Every structure is written in structure tokens, then in C-alpha cells.
Amino acid sequence: MAFDIDFAHRGLIKEHIWKFLLYPEHWNDVANQIPHNLNWNEVPFNSGQLNVVPNNQKGIYCFVLKPEFNQLFETRYLFYVGLTTRNFRTRFKEYLDDLSGKGKPRPKVYSMLKLWDNYLHFYYADLIDDLDIEECETKLLNTFVPKVNTSIPLAKIKPELKNIYE
């Protein structure tokens, strides 16, 4: 058999290679510690979970990839951190719309939703005060610099973080 490379398949594999910043200095930085007790809830990200997500709470949320592999401990990848001052169900529904190609085009979000459909989980933590919500999101963004987020507050003042995934 002659040697051959399936370049279409190779391209598909390369679409699934994503970088992550794993920087303990950020994790341990006192400025990044969250001064609120966050009670995280989790639902698989799919339309069947829409009514499980509360429509009377607001706060911060994350998209996390959880590979399903039964011969390994639970593994998770933080892809996105966001906030909502409306309610979680409304925000969840907007992402379902993004997945189906509706809504405003956000290429990184769309790629995340499409590439890992059925493996993404929506985590959310209820906070009452809008300033607390913004503070928590900022601290999480600065700590983890998730690849899908396009605006990282710390990157605006630290040129070392600007465009690190490009």
C-alpha cells in the first residue's frame, strides 16, 4: 500500500487543537481571588436542559468541555467565562441560538459550540449584585484567560497577554 495522508481529516484534527494558559502565578495572585462564595451549578449544554436553567437568577457562567472517557478520571477544560445581569435561561437560550447559526456572529464562540457539541457543560453561579457579578467575571478572566473570550481586562494593560492565542 502506498503512503498517503488524508489532508481533509488532518485539517479536521487541527481544528481541535486549542491552546490554554496554565499559569500558576495567576491562580495564586491575591488580586485574582474571588471574595464571594460561589455556588456552582452545572448542566450539559443542549436544548433539553433549557428549562432546568433558572430564569430568576443572574451571575457568572462558564463553558467547560468535559470529555467522556470511562477509563480516566474526570477531565475538564475551561473555554469561556461570561456574565449576565438578565437571567441564566435567557443567556443559555442565546447560546443555543448561536449554535444554530442565529444571533450575532462570534466566530470563536461558534467554533467552540460546533466543535464540541454534546461535550460542553454550562456552569453558573448566582450573584445578586451587578458589581459583584462584574468583579467575579473580571477576576476569572484575568486568572484563566480563556481562549474563547475576546476581551481580557488584564490584557489591556499587560502587553504580554495580548493575542497570546494567535
Image (cartoon, rainbow, N blue to C red):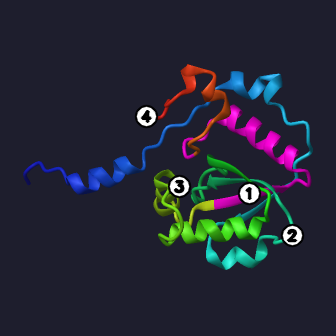
Which one is nearer the viewer's eye here, 97 or 123? 97
Are there few (<14), some (14-19), or many (20+) residues within 10 Å of tag 3? some
The CA span between labels 1 and 4 is 27 Å
Secondary element at tag 1: strand
Tell me: residue 156, above or below residue 20. above
Secondary element at tag 2: loop
Residue 90: quadrant of the picture? bottom right
- Camera-near label (1 vs 3) is 3
Q: What stretch is highlighted in magenta?
A: 121-148
Q: Where is residue 165 in the image (x, y as percent from the top left)?
A: 48, 34
The CA span between labels 1 and 2 is 16 Å
Q: Position of residue 155 (x, y in %)?
A: 61, 28
The residue indicated by pointer 1 is 123
Q: Which of marks 1 and 4 is nearer the N terminus?
A: 1
Q: Which of marks 1 and 2 is nearer the N terminus?
A: 2
Kindly identify the residue that appears in the image at 55 percent across and 20 percent down: 160
Tell me: residue 131, above or below residue 121. above
Q: Earlier in the sequence, mark 1 or mark 3?
A: 3
Q: Residue 56: which disc?
A: 2
Q: What residue type is labelled 3?
A: Val
